[in-house]
Amino acid sequence: MKTGTLARVAVVTGGTTGIGLSCAEHLLIAGHRVAIFSTQAARVDKARDDLSRKFGAEKVIADAVDLRHPDALKAFFEQVERTWSSPEVLVCNAGLSPKHNGQRLAFDIIPIDEWNDVLAINLTGAMLCCQLAAPKMAASGFGRIVLIGSIAGRAMPRLAGASYVASKAALAGMAKSLVSEYSSHGVTINIVAPGNVLTDMMASPDSPAYQAALARIPSGRIGRPEDIAALVAFLASERAEFINGAIIDVNGGEYLPC
């Protein structure tokens, strides 16, 4: 455990691959106990095995949970509380960004089922997790909520479809409401907005889309999951108590808000 860091209980949604898995690893390195979930059982099993081997099985909970099923989500949080305690750190990372033959759909032909699915996972799922975690954080006098946004919700979207863009942009409004209700109880709520990062959502390195994205980044490289996770781990710490209601862009300079 790092000096000056208290061991906490953390939940990371979509925590079995990419940014979510890296966030789980960084939180475990900081000394926390971490519960992760995603929808795919095979990925859950692999992440559980890998994290347990590195950090100890007693510090890891992993399960297959679909954010679109509120009862299953509630049962997962209850399992975490029974095993350890209610989470003091929540990282809402799970996300869905549909592509069709590697391309986004034109706005006027987005199927309503696809639109609803994306918002159910990216926005409503985050809301449900915050409902389950924030009141207990406030009751204990400490909480850290980190919402994983996107450059697509901040700048002119280039690859993401309208449903993904809308869901990520809407996180900012939800964060404002959370800040207004819970900040006086020791809970901070922040958004980390990644740019192009090497995950399953990113185009293959030999594709024109990847090369075009790389050309737009002044830092000269595509982001890595650990670039995001290092910031998330800091925002989860006691040292970040005065960072609240912020949207922090992590994109190598691709998007400059000022």
Image (cartoon, rainbow, N blue to C red):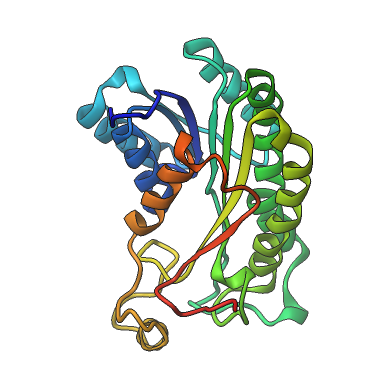
Whether 218 is drawn above or below 95: the answer is below
Q: Which of 155 and 74 is in front in this view?
A: 155
The residue positioned farthest toward the left in the image shown: 53
Whether 169 is drawn above or below 72: the answer is below
x and y percent of residue 141 in the render?
Answer: 63, 23
x and y percent of residue 128 in the render?
Answer: 70, 37
Could you tell me which quadrant the C terminus lies in?
A: bottom right
x and y percent of residue 80 in the render?
Answer: 52, 19
Q: Nearer the viewer, residue 61 or 27?
A: 27
Q: Residue at x 47, y 12 (%)?
A: 83
Relative to 146, 1 lies left or right: left
Relative to 53, 169 lies left or right: right
x and y percent of residue 233 in the render?
Answer: 41, 43
Q: Nearer the viewer, residue 190 or 194?
A: 190
Q: Residue at x 56, y 54 (%)?
A: 95
Q: Which of 187 and 170 is in front in this view?
A: 187
Could you tell me which quadrant the N terminus lies in?
A: top left
Whether 58 is drawn above or below 215: the answer is above
Whether 220 is drawn above or below 32: the answer is below
Q: Can residue 122 be seen in this view?
A: yes
